[in-house]
Amino acid sequence: MVEVLRPARRTTLADDVYESVRTLVMDHAVAPGERINIDALARQLQVSPTPVREALARLESDGLVRKRALAGYTATPLLTRAEFDELVEMRLLLEPVATERAAHRIAGLPEPAEALAALRGAAELPGPAPGTEGFAAIAEFTNQDARFHHLVAEQAGNRLLHDAIVRLRSHLHLFRLYFPATHHGISAREHHRIVDAVTAADADAAGAAMRAHLLAARDRHLPFFETA
């Protein structure tokens, strides 16, 4: 039993350190472009350097930190307006198509109810966590928002399309950039319009609803570039 429990504790520590470092980066406590001192960060979190290195490797795959030879890790700079526009363009190319395919695929399932229920559940978005601020307040919203978009892509039935959408890591980059206070309820309503169209087996409407959602999300983030 002891041998079974040890990996669980190790995994929990690694996940906790990852969440802590991710929060520091998302909150700009580690400023964009700033070099990350692993030993200092380990002392701050009261852990050994090993889980910090593991967390940074995961964050590198998230696109939140960069590693350079002889220079170590630095926090990734914020998206420029040009990079933001490119990210939105990629999402508009990939996600409406994935949503259309998901609507077709689910409609053809012998028992579509389970897939539709999963989408409906993922469409719900939590509000800010009580007693928290900064990224900690929206972390679960960010996770759930990504979960919905990734699930839609998964239901498209094309692994490469799904992987391409996941690799964009768009939610982390966008919410690190700017988080409008009204985002919670509006985004959930837009998600449900997408699920409504998928449930109706209307692929064109589903794709259009996803496109409208992405464009609306783009408009909610544009004020950052006016004030940055």
Image: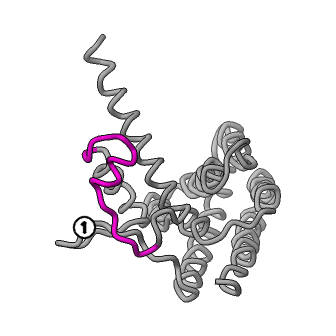
Q: Residue 75 vs residue 137: left or right?
A: left
> Does the segment drawn in magenta span residue 40?
yes
Residue 215 in the image, given as x and y percentages of width and height: 72, 76
**How many numbered callouts?**
1
Q: Quadrant of residue 62?
A: bottom left
**What's drawn in magenta, residue-wise?**
32-50
The N terminus - image quarter: top left
Rendered view: 116 above or below 181: above
Disc 1 marks which residue? Answer: 72
The residue most toward the left is: 70
Colour logic: one colour
Rendered view: 70 above or below 8: below
Q: Which amino acid does label 1 sit on?
A: Gly
> Does the segment drawn in magenta span residue 69?
no
Q: Residue 121 vs residue 86: left or right?
A: right
The C terminus - image quarter: bottom right
| Residue at image point 33% right, 47% down | 43
Residue 175 in the image, given as x and y percentages of width and height: 61, 65
Mark 1: few, some, or many residues within 10 Å (few <14, many ≥20)?
Answer: few
Residue 150 in the image, given as x and y percentages of width and height: 56, 55
| Residue at image point 25% right, 45% down | 50
Closer to us: 212 or 5: 5
Rendered view: 5 above or below 70: above
Residue 121 in the image, given as x and y percentages of width and height: 71, 42
| Residue at image point 34% right, 56% down | 56
**What SS does tag 1 mark?**
strand
Q: In which quarter of the image is residue 113?
A: top right
